Image (spheres, rainbow, N blue to C red):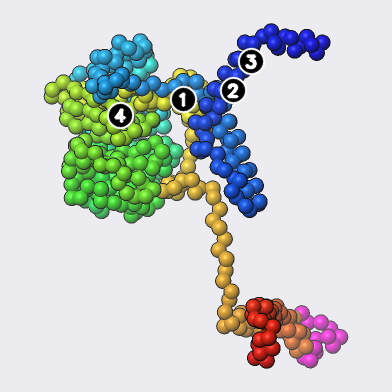
Amino acid sequence: MGSKVVNEGLMNPMFSVEHQENVEEEEINVKKFLRGEVADFKVVRDKKLKGQLELREELYRKCAKAAAKADKWLMPSEGGFLEPEGIEKTWRIRQEAIGPEVDILSKKNQYDIVFPELGPYTLDFSMNGRYMVAAGEKGHLALMDLKKMDIIKEFQVRETVRDVVFLHNEKLFAAAQTKYVYMYNDSGTEMHCLKEHGAVSRLQFLRKQFLLTSINKIGQLNFQDITTGKMISNFRTGLGPLGRSVSDTMQVNRFNNEVAVGHSKGEVSMWKPTSAVPIYSRPCHMEYPVTAIAFHSNGHLMATAGMDKKIKLWDLRKHEVLQTLPGHANSLDFSQKGMLSAASGSYVQVFKDVFSTYVNHSMPKGYQTKKLLFRPYEDVLAIGHSMGWSSILVPGSGEPNFDSWVANPFETRKQRNEKEVRALLDKLPPETIMMDPTTIGCVNPTRKRGMPSQQERDAEMKAAVKGAKNLSFKKKTKGRSKPSKMAKKKQQAIIIAKKPFLEQQTKDEKDLLSKKKRKRIGEEIRLPKTFRRFSEAIG
């Protein structure tokens, strides 16, 4: 039987070849998640340190294998990019050339909706990227299902609409109109009129805290909880009016849910609802109004644009400029894969890896952009402009794999309701908004108390003696409560109160003597034998 198994293995060479290919593929995938090359521990002499480093390296290896396995089975799709040939440049490739090369579903995302008498338009996407709400400044509101390419509801409010934002899901959205902020459902019915916000120029929604955030032209910031209707905080920024392009000078950092506001004097400040002063403030564009702000998905990179015709990239961990790009922009946005889009007038640029130009797009003459927004989980960039809104393809900008527990574009009504209940149960309080949210759940290290001084010890002992003197004893019969016996009991209580202090004092004296003795012995060891007798005589 044994020879038969061996012969079967030899007669099937395809099995060994496929196995070898799988092993090589696994090794390549593991290398993507490793932290560089394995260190050489032979030079480490300390055995304990060497063992700890080897254990840590083995742990990294196991984590990389687990990540590679999850990447293979849970994230099968890979994002595509524009790959030029030879000296060809990607920014020279036009949308007309990209359209015929993509699939039918992606090609549907190239369109241009024209409403010249109702613009300019601002846009917002739902968390899963399936739904979009568009708002024209002349009062036109439209809710669209982008998977079916169908309009769910559109209506005219007959008022100026400055901004629009989705709330926790596509069933509710808020619009900043002439005097107040209004909330509508997906059928166009007015649900609430939020008069406390006043005439708002910019809206944002904090999903984890269920907070609707607004700001007006004079710099008044409002945070309102939409689950209870309570106004959490309402205060003025105190840094003057907003930048020139008021619709694009307030943005939320999705990493820590802080609200960044750009001002007319080139300053960018960050706010949270529990603080009446900014937790971070920095002059980004000296004396020039800030026109646009955008945050990377990792929360550590911020892009700002100003009237000084500069786009600056900031590292929020070091609080310094990483890169300065020439050009003016009245709207900025980061994609899920880290691409940066910038628009000025009728010209749109997309930067890959934030440093090199990836895609350029010129709209027809007369189109003035107001809002740029990448669509989640799709390689699509939406552009709201003065004549309506447009959609262009940017290959590689969206995350190709979605997590159905976080954002599911194909969710059913039951799944949406369950997700809404879970989100309400997991709702975070406003106090959780901070610069570094990873510190939540950590334990502050206990500070070691320094040795008390002699005066502090004497004061503590006096307080203990005073407490012992004021003790009241229970009166007993048959002569056991005589004054002499009561005085004796008080004297015993005073001795008991002094005992721990005296013991501690004796212990400290012994420690001091032992330190002096060790010091003297060390000096004797260092001295030659002929001179030790002199040190004994001095001691």
Q: CA distance from mark 2 to mark 4?
A: 42 Å
For the N terminus, the quadrant is: top right
Picture coordinates of residue 287 (x, y %)? 18, 50
Question: Of the residues shown, which amino acid type is indicated by label 2?
Answer: Val
Which residue does the numbered mark 1 point to in the structure image?
402
Mark 2 vs mark 3: which is more N-terminal? 3
Residue highlighted by disc 4: 373
Query: What residue sits 80% from the left and 88% below the top?
Result: 485
| Mark pair 2, 3: CA separation | 10 Å
Question: Residue 106 in magenta?
Answer: no
Q: Quadrant of residue 302?
A: top left
Say which amino acid is labelled 4. Answer: Leu
Residue 374 seen by the camera = yes
Whether pointer 3 and pointer 1 mark residues with C-beta atoms closer than 8 Å, the reply is: no
Please give the residue where the numbered disc 3 appears in the rendered image.
Answer: 16
In primary-sequence order, the first of circles 2 and 1 is 2
The x and y percentages for residue 142 are 29, 22
Q: Earlier in the sequence, mark 4 or mark 3?
A: 3
Horizontal side of 231 relative to 421 (left or right) equals left
Tell me the mark number nearer the camera, choosing from 2 and 4. Answer: 2
